[in-house]
Image: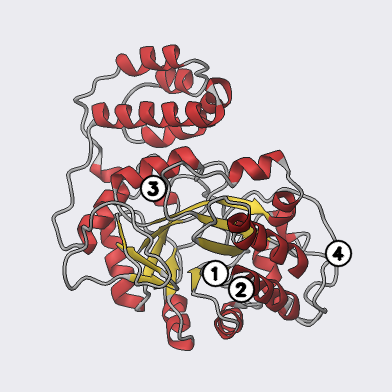
Amino acid sequence: MTLTSPPPPAPVTAGPPRRPEGSTTLTLGALRVWPPVVLAPMAGVTNVAFRTLCRRAGGGLYVSEMVGARGLVEGNTTSQLKAAFGPDEHPRSIQLYALEPEESRAAVHQLTRGAAAAGRDPVDHIDLNFGCPAPKVTRHGGGAALPWRTDLYAGIVAAAVDAAGDVPVTVKLRLGIDDEHLTYLEAGRIAADLGVAGVALHARTAEQRYGPPAAWGHIAALVAAIDVPVLGNGDIWEAADALRMRAETGCAGVVVGRGCLGRPWLFGDLEAAFAGAPIPPAPDLGRVAGLLREHALLLCDHLGETTGLLQLRKHTGWYLQGFPVGRSVRRALNQVSTLEELDGLLGGLDGALPFDETLRRQPRGHTTEPKRVHLPSGWLDSPHHGARAAPVRHEAVSGG
């Protein structure tokens, strides 16, 4: 990975430069990111272990799971764990979920100026989530529902930008609540006017969830509407998709979510593509099994063996997608409880089995079809509701 930053502030770097001369760098405030690739925050997935595995594969900006601002400020153990970084992880990028300006300001201050004052490493980048379509979030007016309430949305963004100081703040949006309530253009303009360093757009509405193809034309519309970098998100399944999205929309970079599930090597493919180099061959089952075991070790180091292997279970099917390993092996891996058991199962696989190229674009992760968005009573009556939200305590569950 190559990240360079002109002084002042001090440069954020991670390893020797690999960016070919003339290639495009993503600029987010003081951060210079190459290749222009961002790992999308995904609940229960993009923790320290998975980010470490992806960073080893290729360059980019690797964002944490979505972390509740209120829980972080109140010292909630789960929130603190989600906000953890590896000892050598730089830049440190975190996504926050807030329902009101005060908790947004407090959490951002704790992660930036407050951390520096206490002698801790501050984060290098903060992303604000306004894209989550999960019912347990939208029914309280959060996630993708929140930009409809324009004054509240503006208050949360303004508080974060003010508290962050020189640390770049970005926002993650969806197109809107549904086709009749699109919010992304106004939300993008508001955020740009308030000083964010960039805007990421998942080109689906909250109602669409993850079902229909992402409508990349809206990404191009946002690029034309605002003067800060726009990141495109939706249907990046292989490296060629990222190049095509850049060409069709003019976006400054791409955000990768479901495409990397079980395939952390995608970030190596993306780095090669943006460098104009040949895409590496897909790994055989032996290499995939090695990555799966490496992922297990990282999870156990981060969470302990019991919890780490519980977390691993959701990943095993993604890693083995397309490989004819048999139902009994898949079932056993989905119930694995010790590293010794995992090693026995992986050791019995035929490592020479090739990757099935016909399944390269097979969806993984969320595949939900369009569903009605759960909203607070009267939420759509007017986009102007004041700058405060009712205090609600709940855990956010998705990065949008």
Is residue 94 at all visible to an observer of this figure? yes
Q: Mark 4: few, some, or many residues within 10 Å (few <14, many ≥20)?
A: few
Question: Given contact means CB atoms under 8 Å apart, are the residues at marks 3 and 4 in contact?
Answer: no
Amino acid found under the numbered disc labelled 1:
Val
Q: Residues within 10 Å of mark 1 (few under 14, many from 20)?
A: many
Q: Which residue is located at x 82 percent, y 72 percent?
A: 388
Q: Nearer the viewer, mark 1 or mark 3?
A: 1
Measuring from the top left, give residue 4's x and y in whole percent.
32, 65
- Residue 260: mark in rendering: 3
Across and down, in percent, residue 174 comes to: 56, 68
Give the numbered dot on residue 161: 2
Q: Give 390 or 6, whichever is nearer the viewer.
A: 6
Tag 2–tag 1 contact (CB < 8 Å): yes
What is the number of the mark on residue 289?
none
Residue receiving disc 4: 390
Q: Which residue is mark 1?
A: 169
N-term-proximal mark, 3 vs 2: 2
Instruction: Answer whether labels 1 and 4 touch (C-beta < 8 Å).
Output: no
Q: Is residue 360 visible?
A: no
> Spatial distance from mark 3 to mark 4, Cα to Cα?
36 Å
Say what amino acid the circle numbered 2 marks. Val
Cα gap from disc 1 to disc 4, whole angstroms: 24 Å
Asked which quadrant contains residue 33, the reply is bottom left
Task: Please identify the residue farthest to the left as the structure is shown.
Answer: 278
Compare marks 4 and 2 and give the one earlier in the sequence.
2
